[in-house]
């Protein structure tokens, strides 16, 4: 097989079948391949971990640094419509051709070393290879799962950002916030800044964070934020104060994410100085699909990838802050290894009609499992719960029945939001 003739879809299908499991926690295999490829970044690396908020922090960092005229590489996951969304340079997705060529090089080295790699590990190596060859000025790497044993952690960070610590991926990371936090602080490095935006650090975790030797900077202690009507103020690590416009990303909780972004930039100001106008423009011009993304006004249609209780509570707060006169239809599909009960319970008081469906993907919950989750969350108005073949059918029902004063909220998974965006051709109005 001539691997250079494979399409991107061929490659992705190949990766899915190559490794016996989709997730294989550990760095030894991917580190060996990385070393053989000679990938040593000569630019600052910002690594972002956390249960929720990672995507928002990466997007704001990317937006600000691009407007400061830096060449910015950004690696995030998962994607919504196209794999190339995961790897961007200056906010532009890389082409299929570039990805295929890099995958072929990685595969050649992997085969010669007789090492297996997961789907995510291939993507992580490809991202760094592309960034190194493009000679970016800075790379932003989003952790896929946890931190300590995540593939991005083979690259030493110049500044770590920890956005939040909540219960998710418990089969891999542990069943308590302390255990999950322990995995996430694995991205910290001695004598390098570590920005922590978690406001309620588990008491047993704090000494472990300090023991890493990182230059720890915590929200509400070393930096802080306050909102004032249509603007907000950031008070920084070295006494810097900014009066700033609200971020384009919706929700008061985004100010916490934005303050972590500014704390990270402040910690790196000697190597990556950023003017105030770039911060202002970056915050107001940032975009991020699937995070309280409003694609229609009448009826209001909102897409949100909230897939765990903590994210669902934030979505609930956003819905409360933007009330509608009519009813709210929820289009919901989830993965069965998520806390489905806790997630739907968080939105119990926001939803009038539940339009549920199974997800036809690996780990996808069936419609019956979604129905049971609603019942276990004490959502039992049977005349307000409808089961559909798939989320597209659920969404079509919502569009048919919602009037202009109503609201449709699509949530539960990246797969759920992706299905709706694909149905719309990816267009946003």
Image (cartoon, rainbow, N blue to C red):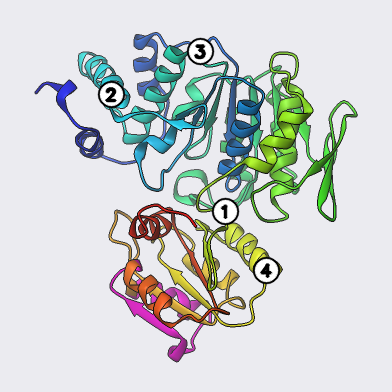
With respect to residue 172, does 367 lie above or below? below
Q: Residue furthest left?
A: 1
Q: Position of residue 277 (x, y in %)?
A: 76, 30
Q: Which residue is mark 2?
A: 103
Give SS at disc 3: loop
Whichever of callouts 4 and 3 sits on the residue coming sooner in the sequence is 3
Q: Residue furthest bottom?
A: 383
Q: Which residue is mark 4?
A: 322
Dot 4 and dot 2 residues touching (CB under 8 Å): no
Q: Report, in whole angstroms, how far the alpha carbon at label 4 lies from the one at label 3.
A: 44 Å
Tell me what residue is drawn at x 73 percent, y 46 percent.
256
Foreground mark, 1 or 2, reads 2
With respect to residue 48, does 339 lie above or below? below
Inspect this view and state whether residue 201 appears: no
Whichever of callouts 3 and 2 sits on the residue coming sooner in the sequence is 3
Whichever of callouts 4 and 1 sits on the residue coming sooner in the sequence is 1
Q: Report, in whole angstroms, how far the alpha carbon at label 3 lies from the one at label 2.
A: 18 Å
Compared across the picture, whether 27 is left or right of 227 comes to left
Q: Which residue is mark 1?
A: 167
Q: Report, in whole angstroms, how far the alpha carbon at label 4 lies from the one at label 1.
A: 27 Å
Inspect this view and state whether residue 164 appears: yes
Foreground mark, 3 or 1, reads 3
Res. 69 image quadrant: top right
Tell me what residue is drawn at x 26 percent, y 36 percent.
12
257 or 19, which is in the foreground?
257
Q: Which residue is mark 3?
A: 41
With respect to residue 200, does 322 lie above or below? below
Q: Which residues are magenta?
A: 368-391
Res. 213 image quadrant: top right
């Amino acid at each position: 097989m001539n691997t250079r003739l494979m399409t991107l879809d061929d490659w992705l299908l190949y990766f899915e079948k190559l490794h016996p499991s989709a997730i294989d926690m550990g760095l030894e295999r991917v580190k060996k391949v990385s070393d053989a490829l000679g990938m040593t970044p000569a630019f600052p690396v910002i690594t972002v971990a956390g249960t929720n908020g990672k995507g928002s922090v990466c997007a704001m960092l990317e937006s600000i640094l691009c407007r400061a005229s830096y060449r910015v590489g950004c690696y995030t996951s998962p994607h919504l419509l196209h794999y190339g969304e995961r790897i961007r340079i200056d906010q532009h997705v890389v082409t299929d051709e570039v990805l295929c060529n890099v995958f072929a090089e990685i595969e050649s080295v992997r085969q010669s070393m007789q090492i297996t790699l997961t789907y995510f590990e291939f993507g992580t190596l490809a991202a760094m290879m592309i960034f190194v060859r493009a000679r970016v000025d800075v790379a932003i790497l989003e952790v896929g799962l946890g931190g300590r044993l995540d593939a991005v952690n083979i690259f030493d960070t110049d500044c770590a950002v920890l956005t939040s610590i909540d219960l998710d991926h418990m089969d891999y990371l542990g069943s308590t916030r302390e255990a999950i936090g322990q995995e996430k602080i694995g991205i910290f490095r001695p004598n390098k800044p570590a920005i922590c935006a978690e406001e309620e650090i588990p008491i047993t975790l704090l000494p472990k964070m300090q023991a890493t030797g990182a230059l720890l900077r915590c929200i509400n202690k070393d930096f802080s934020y306050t909102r004032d009507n249509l603007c907000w103020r950031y008070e920084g690590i070295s006494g810097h104060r900014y009066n700033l416009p609200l971020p384009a990303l919706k929700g008061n909780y985004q100010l916490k994410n934005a303050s972590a972004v500014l704390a990270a930039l402040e910690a790196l100001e000697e190597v990556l100085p950023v003017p105030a106008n770039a911060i202002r423009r970056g915050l107001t011009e940032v975009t991020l699909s699937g995070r309280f993304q409003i694609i229609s006004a009448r009826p209001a249609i909102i897409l949100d990838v909230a897939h765990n209780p903590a994210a669902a509570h934030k979505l609930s707060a956003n819905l409360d802050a933007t009330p509608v006169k009519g009813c709210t239809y929820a289009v919901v599909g989830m993965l069965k290894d998520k806390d489905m009960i806790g997630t739907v319970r968080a939105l119990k008081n926001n939803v009038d009609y539940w339009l549920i469906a199974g997800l036809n993907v690996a780990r996808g919950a069936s419609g019956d499992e979604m129905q049971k989750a609603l019942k276990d969350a004490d959502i039992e108005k049977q005349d307000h719960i409808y089961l559909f073949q798939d989320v597209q059918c659920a969404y079509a029902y919502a569009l048919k029945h919602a009037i202009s004063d109503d609201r449709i909220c699509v949530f539960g998974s990246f797969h759920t939001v992706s299905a709706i965006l694909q149905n719309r051709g990816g267009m946003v109005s």
